[in-house]
C-alpha cells in the first residue's frame, strides 16, 4: 500500500497513535539501520535496510513498536521501543 506522506501520518495516528512517524525516517530495528518507505497491507512499516548484502533491496515488514528506535534528521533517537516498555 503506497501512501502519500499525509495519508501515511493519518494511518499511523489512527492505527498506532504515532503521529510523529514519517516516510523517509531513519530507524534501527533489532540493531540494523533502515529507512521507512511506507505502510504495508497489515499496517506495519515497510523498512528498507542499509545493509543490502544482509537484507537485499526490498522492503521488510517491521512492527512499529517492536525492538525499534526512531531517529530525527540529526540522528538523535526520538523514540525507543527496544526495552520492552513503550518509551517515548
Image (cartoon, rainbow, N blue to C red):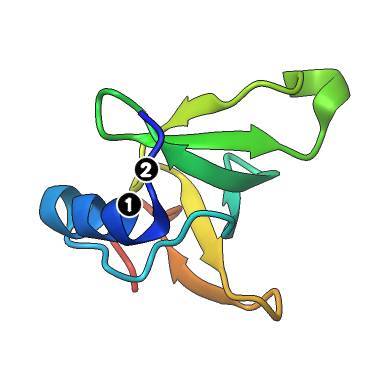
Q: Is residue 10 left or right of residue 62?
A: left
Pick the residue in front: 66 or 48: 48
Residue lying at 33% horizontally and 68% vertically, measured from the top left: 87
Identify the mark nearer the N-term, 1 or 2.
2
Question: Above or below — where is 58 with respect to 47?
Answer: above
Q: Is residue 60 left or right of residue 32?
A: left
Is disc 2 placed on a helix, strand or loop?
Answer: loop
Task: Give me the C-alpha separation between circle 1 and circle 2.
Answer: 6 Å
Residue 85 placed where, x, y %?
29, 58
Residue located farthest toward the right when viewing the structure as drawn:
53
Residue 23 placed where, x, y %?
50, 54
Label disc, if present, on residue 3 of the rendered structure: 2
The residue where tag 1 is placed is: 8
Residue lying at 78% horizontally and 40% vertically, measured from the top left: 50
Q: Classify the position of the C terminus by image quarter.
A: bottom left
Q: Is residue 16 left or right of residue 8?
A: left
Residue located farthest toward the left when viewing the structure as drawn:
14
Residue lying at 73% horizontally and 21% vertically, measured from the top left: 55
Is disc 1 placed on a helix, strand or loop?
Answer: helix
Residue 56 placed where, x, y %?
76, 18
Label disc, if present, on residue 22 of the rendered structure: none
Image-quadrant location for residue 67:
top left
Pick the residue in front: 66 or 51: 51
Residue 85 appearing in the image: no
Q: Are marks 1 and 2 in contact (CB under 8 Å)?
A: yes
Question: Above or below — where is 13 with respect to 46?
Answer: below
Image-quadrant location for residue 39:
top left
Residue 15 appearing in the image: yes
Residue lying at 58% horizontally and 39% vertically, measured from the top left: 30
Amino acid at each position: 500500500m503506497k501512501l502519500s506522506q499525509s495519508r501515511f501520518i493519518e494511518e499511523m495516528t489512527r492505527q498506532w497513535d504515532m503521529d510523529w512517524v514519517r516516510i523517509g525516517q531513519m530507524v534501527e530495528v533489532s540493531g540494523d539501520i533502515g529507512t521507512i518507505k511506507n505502510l504495508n497491507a497489515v499496517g506495519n512499516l515497510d523498512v528498507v535496510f542499509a545493509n543490502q548484502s544482509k537484507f537485499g533491496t526490498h522492503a521488510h515488514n517491521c512492527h512499529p513498536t517492536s525492538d525499534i528506535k526512531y531517529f530525527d534528521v540529526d540522528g538523535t533517537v526520538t523514540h525507543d521501543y527496544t526495552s520492552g516498555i513503550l518509551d517515548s
